[in-house]
Amino acid sequence: MPPDETNLIDLPGGDPAVRMGVFAALFLTFAALEAVYPRRNRTSSRPVRWYSNLGLTFLNSLSHRFIFPVLGIEMALICAERGWGFLNDHETPYAVAFIASVVVLDLVVYLQHVVFHHVPWLWRLHRVHHADVDLDASSGIRFHVLESIISMCIKLGAIAVIGPPAMAALFFEILLNGAAMFNHANMRIPLGIDRILRWLIVTPDMHRVHHSVITDEMNSNYGFNLPWWDRIFGTYRAQPAEGHTGMTIGLDRFRSIKDQHLFQLLIQPFRAKPTDAE
């Protein structure tokens, strides 16, 4: 039987404090694994990067609470109550609706990611994420505040159209955040295991290619969670040309330690022309 989805707090994991606890536990787990099994040597100051990346995450959470009357899970509850969205308008078995919602929301994130790379003014915002000169779990939650606001608008619109079960929206939120931290982690996974895993989820080695300074590699492997979209739409690249330990991560024009400070990340979209990914 599906859970009671009439109240946010009634949902398993619906309490914001529980979700924050899960987020913190995942971040600390991946950070610990990076320390024990690193894939690459660091090239920049981790304290500077962490205070900036986590600072952006804090500002993003704050902006969502001030700007949006509801967030994703609350939107799903409203849609269920008012019959909005395709799945609420069509009788669908709960398990089918749950799985379909997660898959379609993941496709929306993939398509959004592609668009942010190829529309110049959106790239100005998204390049804050790509300007990280090292990758670790904190990179997965490093996004400019304006990009985060636009992403939330897209997510709310997608939920209104799809009409997913509230538990599916909650599961997708946790899954997306956890997967983003996982696939940005500087974590060594045995190559044989990686070859199997990347058919099921985007792995760190798969996503690292996307953060190359080489434009063709940067414009590949857009997936954050499910790895299938890159294969289906022809944007999959198995390995970087220079290898994972030899490749250069980031953007050439934003490589100094000054560029990694929080204030510089906030003003970066307004500093130069958005030509890096064109």
Image (tube, helix red, strand yellow):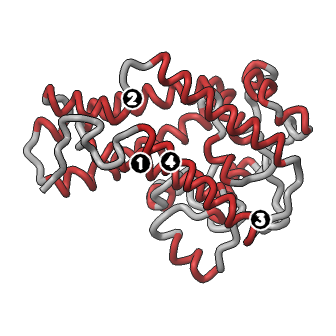
Q: Residues within 10 Å of mark 1 (few under 14, many from 20)?
A: many
Percent from the top left, x then y, of residue 219?
Answer: 64, 48
Disc 4 to disc 3, C-alpha distance: 39 Å
Residue drawn where x is 20% and y is 50% of the image: 97
Name the element at disc 2. Answer: loop
Amino acid type at circle 3 is Ala
Q: How crowded is mark 4: few (under 14 residues within 10 Å), some or many (20 or more)?
A: few
Q: Give the image quarter of residue 217.
A: bottom right
The residue that label 4 is drawn on is: 21
Q: Looking at the image, is mark 1 or mark 2 earlier in the sequence? A: 2
The residue that label 2 is drawn on is: 71
Residue drawn where x is 51% and y is 25% of the image: 150
Percent from the top left, x then y, of residue 265?
Answer: 76, 29
**Quadrant of the image containing the N terminus:** bottom left
Image disc number at residue 276: none
Amino acid type at circle 4 is Gly
Left or right, residue 11 beside residue 90: right
Left or right, residue 84 beside residue 114: left
Amino acid type at circle 2 is Leu
The residue that label 3 is drawn on is: 241
